[in-house]
Image: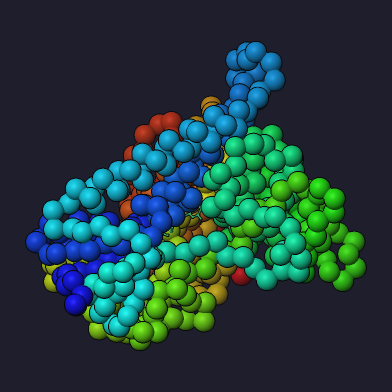
Amino acid sequence: MAARFDAIIVGTGQAGPALAARFAKVGMQVAIIERNLFGGTCVNTGCIPTKALIASAYAAQLARRAAEYGVKTGGAVEVDMKRVKARKDAISARSRNGVEEWLKGLANCTVLKGHARFESAHAIRVNDELISAERIFLNVGTRPHVPPMTGLDQVPYLTNSTMMDVDFLPEHLIVIGGSYTGLEFAQMYRRFGSAVTVVEKSPRVVAREDEDVSLALQEILRGEGITVELRAECMAAEKRGERIVVKLDCDDGMREAVGSHLLLAVGRTPNTDDLGLQAAGIEVDGRGYILVDDALRTRVDGVWALGDCNGRGAFTHTAYNDYEIVADNLLDGANRSVRDRIVAYGLFVDPPLGRVGMTVNEIRRSGRRALIGVRPMTRVGRAIEKGETQGFIKIAVDADTKEILGAAILGVGGDEAVHCLIDAMYAKAPYTVIQRAVHIHPTVCELLPTVLGDLRPMAE
Ligand SMILES: Cc1cc2nc3c(=O)[nH]c(=O)nc-3n(C[C@H](O)[C@H](O)[C@H](O)COP(=O)(O)OP(=O)(O)OC[C@H]3O[C@@H](n4cnc5c(N)ncnc54)[C@H](O)[C@@H]3O)c2cc1C
């Protein structure tokens, strides 16, 4: 006989634990299952540890630049990788233990450790135990994607997960993938002291962004001594003695990157292949993401999918928002949907990129008439005072409705400043509201009204 619960939640990432707590609070009997580390990707191998490492890398960089600020240091800057890792581990552990203790301390919540697999639409096996519920919530996340690449089975490689165990300085790190994850690792290791080569198959890094953003990022990275190899359309890996070689052009073999370590940062694969979805009749798309409607219901009655595994978001904040949508709809009779969500995210290189809404390329494709405001960070007082003037602010608004369509703030504080625009967009306020707001001096945000006061028609 299967033990019965009111709700079963698979995975303790960014949606599962909050959902368990909310259900348990209203008296539902909940089972939550985790096969690996409590807190999932963000806590253990994603956002939290990478941002902790980036903070160490920033400290190293600032120490190298200390003289620019009139500060004397005692000679060359050295990075102690064991201490960098220990600091990162402590920060991750604090979150991980917090999630575990929270869940285990919840009344009405049973925490099961093991791999969950469907036996039927409403029954799941964990180890030797069979449990069932009318309502099942999948929050199983994703793992690093390993691309089919000639020779990759012959060379050792790292992923964002195994990078978490690195407590030494790679002499030369080759990063395959010039997108968000790849660039964060590339810059942090360069700042720790490694030689770094980024290999990207597109003609520019973070190709989803506008060209000006990609070019500014390339300039920032190259300025720090990172080699950026673009248009590596056909890659192959091989071991040459102790070195790892990545061939960038399989036809003529002329271009290659040679290093000591290889990091793969080429996207994610959903953890849906070993969940027994077929036994439940739950459908996935061609890449393995669980098909859901706008309220995150799968096509099987009583089964929902939240977080990265549903392919509707790829961030901690979108996974958490999935929890809010599902919980409010089920418990409060709300009618929330992912369609109400505005795209927003950060790229946490230094200086960071804060993004919201459409890119200018997307606006062009949409056929809307837009006005664009741009200001380089060299004309932002706060950036000048801090000695961090790389990047720019760019805001796009609808020429007819005055709504804010999108923004990219690449520059010091850009990840925070973009929230002025995010909130105005959620409030559906016209940009003129921000234009008349009195912001605090000296901040990056204080220039947003100025940028909005100097809008030009978008080039065709
Ligand atoms: C290097 C890196 C940096 C990132 N930085 C950021 C950032 O700065 N900001 C941001 O917003 N996002 C960032 N992300 C993305 C963010 O980490 C994810 O969007 C977020 O963790 C998704 O959470 P989730 O709840 O969907 O799944 P996850 O956090 O992946 O959790 C899924 C959980 O389910 C468990 N599980 C899977 N299958 C089973 C099973 N069959 N049985 C039992 N348990 C199972 C897993 O062990 C895991 O604990 C980053 C990601 C990476 C890789």
Report the label total. Answer: 0
Question: Which quadrant does ligand 1 occupy?
Answer: bottom left
What percent of the width, then of the height, locates residue 298? 32, 80
Q: In this rendering, is residue 452 above or below 73? A: below
Q: In this rendering, is residue 419 above or below 87? A: below
Which residue is depicted at the point 30% across and 48% down? 99
Name the image quarter holding the C terminus. bottom right
Q: In this rendering, is residue 64 above or below 107? A: above
Q: On the rendered structure, is 295 left or right of 389?
A: left
Q: On the rendered structure, is 39 left or right of 218?
A: left
Q: On the rendered structure, is 62 left or right of 199?
A: left
What percent of the width, then of the height, locates residue 20? 22, 60
The quarter of the displayed image where residue 35 is located: bottom left
What percent of the width, then of the height, locates residue 398? 44, 65
Which residue is depicted at the point 44% across and 55% down? 41
The quarter of the displayed image where residue 98 is located: top left
What percent of the width, then of the height, locates residue 79? 62, 28
The quarter of the displayed image where residue 195 is located: top right
Quick check: can you spot residue 392?
no
Q: Foreground residue, 359 or 195?
A: 195
Which residue is depicted at the point 42% across and 69% down? 309
Q: How is the image coloured?
A: rainbow
Which residue is depicted at the point 27% across and 69% down? 129
Q: Foreground residue, 139 or 190?
A: 139
- Which residue is farthest left? 27
Q: On the rendered structure, is 15 left or right of 385?
A: left
Name the image quarter holding the N terminus. bottom left
Quick check: can you spot residue 276?
yes
